[in-house]
Structure formats: C-alpha cells, structure tokens
Amino acid sequence: MSITCSNCQHTTDEGVFCIHCGAKLPEKIQGEAHSSQPLSSSQRVSYGEAQLNQGTEPTSNSMLTKERMQKASESSKMYASYVMDNIRSPYQRLQTISQSHLIQALVTMGIYALLIPLILYIQLQSSIGLFGDVPFFETVVKPFLGYIVFLLLIGAITFGVIVLNRYQASYTEVIARFGTILLPFVGLLILAILMSLLNIGMFILPLLIAFTGAIFVAPLLVLLSYHEPGCERIDLMYSILLIIVGAYVTIRIMSEVLLSFVSQLFRF
C-alpha cells in the first residue's frame, strides 16, 4: 500500500519514516500498520474462549435434549406401570389411590376425552371425506375440551357428595380416583376405535358403554371407595341419587358438545 508523506509529498511504501526526507509518516497510517500486528496474549485468550464457547454450545444442547428424552421415557414407564397395576383390579386398588396419582389420572382423563371425538372424526372422514374435508377443530379439538370440562364437573359433583357425608377427602384425591377408575372405559374406547378403523359396525356398543359408564358408574365407585357403613351423614341410596341427578343435569347443560357425536354417528 503506497503512502504519501505530508512533508515532501513523496510517495513511498508502508513504513514509519519517509525514505526521501526522513519525516515521520502520519499517525493514522501507523494505526493501520499496528492493526496488522499479531494478536496479544490477552486477545488470543479471548479468541480461544470464544471458539471454546462455540464448540460447547452444540454439546450443551444435545445434553439438554438427551435429558428431556430421558425424563419423557421415565414418565412413560411410570404411566405404563400405573396402568398395569390398576387395570387388573381397578376398584380393589381404588382406596390406595391418593393425590400423588393426580398426574396419571389427568392423563387418563385426557385420553378418554380425546378418543370419543376421534372416533367421530374417523367415521365422518370415511363417510363424507370424498365430498370434502372434515373440520378437525370442530370435530375433535372443541369436543375434547368440552369433555375435559365435563369430566372435571362430574368429579366436582362426586366430591360434593363425599363432603356432604363428611368423609375425609380432597378434590385432587377424588379426581385422582375418578381418573383411575376410567381406565377400563379407556380400554373400551381403544377397542371401539380399532373396530371403527376396521369398519366393524358394532364399534358403537363399546363406545356407548364407555360413555355411559364414565358418567354413571365411575362416580358411584369413587363414592363407594370412601363409604364407611354407619359413618355416613346421608344414606347411601340418596348419595347415589344425588350423583346421578347431578350427572344428568350436567349432561343437559353440555348436551350440545357431549351428545352431538351420538347423533352424528347414527346418521352413517
């Protein structure tokens, strides 16, 4: 790079002094010259740290992904163990269920709430899918959320009757037991969806058993798991009637969401 001396206007190569008059070259040029000098030790350390951080970032991300996968695997194993322990004799084990099983119970309730509208979606897709797409949100997502709310309301009604009888229980524990007792009905829904995929018309039978059983049978079994003869405040007969009436009123309120799938299925 050529440099013009500010004293004699002689053009020379890079350097500190002019080779013609010996005057010192401009300071800004020296700064440019200095910029080409080797990095200092502190600069080399900073550069090395930056390279090290860039190298360790993918490693930390992979470790985080591995930890998440491991946690997901452990959670799946815990839920599978929970299912196997309670599906064999659900009522006998119901008294051992506490609020520590709440997460597994909520997962079971979520699966139950998802399978019913999913069966409807499969049937509608196979029946009218040739004429257009079936709206997934209206057919699956919206009813799924409605069933979640409905199941929680049924659990609240059951909890209210249990409290009226002065049994020692918490709402989370009642929901944990209610979700656990739904396991056999989830099994029936899985059977119904397999039959639906195979175009077996009798799929409606396990579907209706699972639907009515979760509403009228499961809450009564939860109540009986707290029942202590001679300690109840309300006679068991009236407690059962209260749950049935409460479930019926809840169905009437949410009938547009809950029972729409039945009318849709019987059309095809």
Image: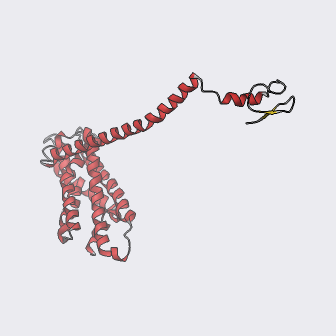
Residue pushed farthest bottom?
Answer: 131
Q: Position of residue 125 (x, y in %)?
A: 32, 70
| Residue 83 in the image: above or below residue 259 | above
Residue 26: tell me if it is visible.
yes
Q: Position of residue 91 (x, y in %)?
A: 14, 47
Residue 238: tell me if it is visible.
no
Residue pushed farthest top?
Answer: 41
Q: Quadrant of the N terminus?
A: top right
Q: Nearer the viewer, residue 118 or 173?
A: 118
Q: Quadrant of the C terminus?
A: bottom left
| Residue 200 in the image: above or below residue 91 | below
Q: Residue at x 42, y 38 (%)?
A: 58
Q: Nearer the viewer, residue 243 or 75?
A: 75
Q: Position of residue 222 (x, y in %)?
A: 20, 47
Q: Residue at x 23, y 43 (%)?
A: 77
Residue pushed farthest front?
Answer: 20
Q: Quadrant of residue 127?
A: bottom left
Q: Nearer the viewer, residue 105 or 240?
A: 105
